[in-house]
Image (tube, rainbow, N blue to C red):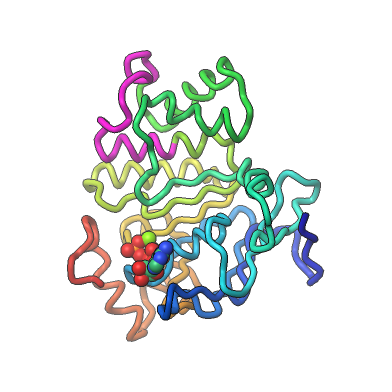
């Protein structure tokens, strides 16, 4: 079991990334990354393709081990939600305990082949140990909140057969089913048509509930940023290069930010020359 952080903290801290370092072979991806996220914030993490956004997320989720540095997260299962260092966790049980209150919408949805219902039921069964009647009730509630059907036919349909927009909704429904206090989205609108993208943006805003939960969105979507107006964090060369409001980001006169910002609208479907 890990200890709690000795340094002064505010009770409001949800996530604190400290001096995070990660290389793959000789490719240095995170180079002293530092980031603090408070409870109730909506934070967008942006930056060029390959700059390390998903790698950062994987460290926060405890799915990757850093070469050095720390990731403190609020343990919302304990009174006062003390910060615990996920880099020191030695077993999956501790990670699972933290994840009880986290919802994650992965970049490629991470739906598995099988029915819509099974995709919703698995985490509730495995992580929350819920029984099937409780699972059915939650499944209907979260599908309703993402405007997907709750019919038996839909619940039994194959998740692999859903359109991109519907699959994203199902991934969001599954994240919501965890009754999360922290919701992570990795590129939730990439590859969607503009109408579906706008609907997902609205859904992200609605699920944030004005700050009742903490929302962290990895995105290249300029429309999302301008509609939701989150705190905007840009990664560059393994660190946080910019951290401020979207308005400040939009008007920043930086030779790193400008070309990225200008290229953002072309990114639906991933411009091939963006690497
Ligand atoms: N498991 C891994 N093994 C080796 N290299 C990896 C691994 N995971 C990520 N990388 C490399 O780390 C870099 C950052 O990857 P990451 O997936 O975080 O990028 P990203 O910022 O999320 O990009 P995108 O916007 O395209 O999703 C890339 O160069 C990638 O190839
Ligand atoms: Mg990524």
Residue 140 x, y percent position in the rendering: 47, 21
Bounds of the magenta segment = 150-172
Please tell me which residue is depicted at 58% across the width and 45% down the height of the picture: 102
Q: Quadrant of residue 25?
A: bottom left
Please tell me which residue is depicted at 50% across the width and 27% down the height of the picture: 121
Residue 109 x, y percent position in the rendering: 37, 44
Asked if residue 116 is among those painted magenta in the image, a careful observer would answer no
Nearest the camera: 173 or 244?
Answer: 173
- Quadrant occupied by the C terminus: bottom left
Image-quarter location of ligand 2? bottom left
92 in relation to 267, above or below: above
Residue 72 x, y percent position in the rendering: 67, 62
Q: Which residue in the rendered view is the most extreme toward the front?
A: 25
52 in relation to 148, above or below: below
Please tell me which residue is depicted at 61% across the width and 45% down the height of the picture: 99
Q: Is residue 8 visible?
A: yes
Q: Which residue in the rendered view is the most extreme toward the left?
A: 272
131 in relation to 275, above or below: above
Q: Quadrant of residue 34?
A: bottom right
Q: Is residue 47 visible?
A: no
Nearest the camera: 164 or 145?
Answer: 164
Asked if residue 158 is among those painted magenta in the image, a careful observer would answer yes
Majority secondary structure in the magenta region? helix
Left or right, 51 with reference to 176: left
- Quadrant occupied by the N terminus: bottom right
């Amino acid at each position: 079991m890990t200890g709690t952080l000795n340094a002064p903290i505010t009770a409001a801290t949800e996530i604190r990334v400290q001096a995070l370092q990660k290389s793959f072979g000789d490719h240095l991806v995170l180079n002293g990354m530092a980031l603090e996220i408070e409870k109730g914030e909506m934070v967008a993490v942006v930056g060029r393709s390959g700059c390390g956004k998903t790698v950062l997320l994987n460290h926060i989720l405890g799915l990757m081990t850093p070469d050095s540095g720390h990731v403190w997260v609020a343990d919302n299962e304990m009174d006062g939600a003390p910060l615990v260092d996920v880099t020191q966790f030695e077993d999956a049980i501790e990670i699972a305990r933290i994840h009880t209150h986290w919802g994650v919408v992965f970049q490629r949805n991470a739906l598995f082949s099988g029915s819509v219902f099974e995709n919703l039921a698995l985490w509730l069964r495995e992580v929350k140990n819920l029984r099937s009647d409780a699972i059915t009730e939650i499944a209907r509630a979260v599908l309703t909140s993402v405007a997907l059907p709750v019919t038996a036919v839909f619940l039994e349909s194959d998740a692999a057969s859903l359109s991109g927009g519907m699959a994203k909704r199902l991934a969001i429904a599954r994240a919501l089913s965890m009754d999360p206090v922290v919701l992570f989205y990795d590129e939730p609108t990439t590859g969607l048509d503009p109408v579906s993208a706008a609907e997902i943006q609205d859904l992200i805003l609605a699920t944030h509930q004005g700050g009742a939960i903490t929302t962290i969105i990895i995105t290249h979507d300029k429309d999302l940023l301008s509609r939701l107006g989150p705190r905007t964090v840009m990664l560059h060369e393994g660190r946080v290069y910019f951290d401020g409001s979207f308005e400040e980001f939009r008007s920043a006169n930086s030779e790193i930010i400008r070309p990225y910002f200008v290229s953002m609208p072309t990114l639906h479907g991933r411009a091939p020359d963006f690497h």
